[in-house]
Image (cartoon, rainbow, N blue to C red):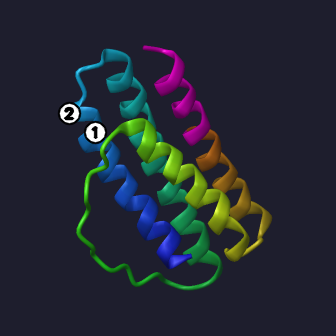
Amino acid sequence: MESFITRLLHCVTVTHMLHLNTRSYSEHIALGDFYEGLEDLIDSLAEQYQGKYKMIAFEVEEVIPASSALEYLMALSEYVIDTRNDLPMDSELQNTIDEIQSLINGTLYKLRFLK
């Protein structure tokens, strides 16, 4: 869980940078909604996990921006799908992960079709 939450926290930073660098208004809005929503969901997931299990010792890692927002979010979606079964299966934690995946899916829709 520590690695999962850390990766998602880095995603907030990366998508914020992509939001600031885009010249597309629709991509700017979609990414702004995404990183703001993701930050709240990650905070909730981390607090739920720590309340139920233990404190997380976060490690600071260097963040490398992605080449495009669409590719970055597609890779993030795959990461969440591939990783979620290795995380605690408590329904409240998995529900928050569902909300994170839903936010990713909605943002992918905006990035693909609302140009």
Element at label 2:
helix
Image coordinates of residue 48 in percent, x first then y, are 60, 67
At 34% from the left edge and 44% from the top edge, which residue is drawn? 15
Q: Identify the mark at residue 82; answer none if there is no mark.
A: none
Magenta segment main secondary structure? helix
For the residue pair 67 and 110, the one nearer the viewer reads as: 67
Q: Is residue 111 visible?
A: yes
Element at label 1:
helix
For the residue pair 93 and 19, the one nearer the viewer reads as: 19
Identify which amino acid the numbered label 2 is placed on: Asn
Identify which amino acid the numbered label 1 is placed on: Leu
Q: Pointer 2: what residue?
A: 21
Answer with left or right where residue 11 lies relative to residue 92.
left
Image coordinates of residue 57 in percent, x first then y, are 40, 84
Image coordinates of residue 75 in percent, x first then y, are 50, 52
Answer with left or right where residue 35 lies relative to residue 109.
left
User: Does the magenta segment cover residue 105?
Assistant: yes
Image coordinates of residue 8 in percent, x first then y, are 45, 59
**Is the N terminus in the top left, top right, bottom left or bottom right quadrant?**
bottom right
Tag 1 and tag 2, C-beta contact below 8 Å: yes
Q: Is residue 36 visible?
A: no
At 36% from the left edge and 51% from the top edge, which residue is drawn? 12
At 42% from the left edge and 69% from the top edge, which residue is drawn? 6
At 72% from the left edge and 55% from the top edge, which residue is drawn? 95
For the residue pair 96 and 72, the one nearer the viewer reads as: 72
Image: magenta residue range: 104-115
Looking at the rendered structure, the number of numbered marks drawn on it comes to 2
Q: Identify the mark at residue 18; answer none if there is no mark.
A: 1
Answer with left or right where residue 50 lies relative to residue 18.
right
User: Does the magenta segment cover residue 31?
Assistant: no
